Amino acid sequence: PCIVAGCGHSCAAREMPEHLVSGAHHNDLSSAQIPSKNCFQFETALEVEPTPREWWRVDCSWCPVVVETSLGWICVDNRRLVDGMLRYTVRHFDRPLKFTLLLGDESRSLVACDRTVDVTSEDDCVLVHGEQANKFCIREEEADGASRLRLTMRLSVETLSGPGEPAPP
């Protein structure tokens, strides 16, 4: 089944990226910047009250990010804030990959490394407590006086190598 809630489309996992980016879900996906062939950057933004210190206490969710890398399609979905925890699922549509997620920037960051999961998995790959993620947020003031918090993330993928798995070329 499709990863977008409410969509009745069903196809093989390898064919799902084509369905997702075909236009049917144009408004259901978030964009990403692609600085290199196996790395992309995306943001999580949240409108906040005047005191954003405890923004992580508000349950909310964001659209999936779907990107084609040279190693295959990757999807970051189940992006949500629940019970003070920032949660993400990093999925593959073809073969498992190793991913590295960097919150923040090169000068101050939090790094998470794990394996991607398949499209049917319900597992969260990344869990970060809101208080910790707050250290990497940038507060932006809008013209209308509203505040917005932006958390930038960079995700890179590489092939897995280990017992029973082929080494990267």
Image (cartoon, grey):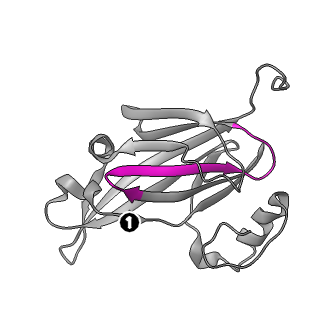
Residue 15, image x, y percentages = 84, 63
Confirm whether the magenta stretch covers residue 24. no
Q: Amino acid at mark 1?
A: Cys
Query: Is disc 1 surrounded by few (<14), some (14 to 19) or many (20+) residues within 10 Å?
Result: few
Per the rendered image, the range of residues in magenta is: 81-97
Residue 56, image x, y percentages = 28, 55
> Is 143 located above or below residue 101 in the figure?
below
Please tell me which residue is depicted at 19% across the width and 58% down the height of the picture: 52
Please tell me which residue is depicted at 78% across the width and 64% down the height of the picture: 16
Q: Quadrant of residue 155?
A: top right
Q: State left or right for residue 13 relative to residue 57.
A: right
Q: Observer-nearest residue: 104 or 113?
A: 113
Q: State left or right for residue 37 relative to residue 76.
A: right
> Is 69 located above or below residue 30 in the figure?
above
The outermost residue toward the top is: 163
Q: Mark 1 — residue?
A: 60
Residue 125, image x, y percentages = 55, 43
Please tell me which residue is depicted at 65% across the width and 76% down the height of the picture: 25
Callout 1 secondary element: strand
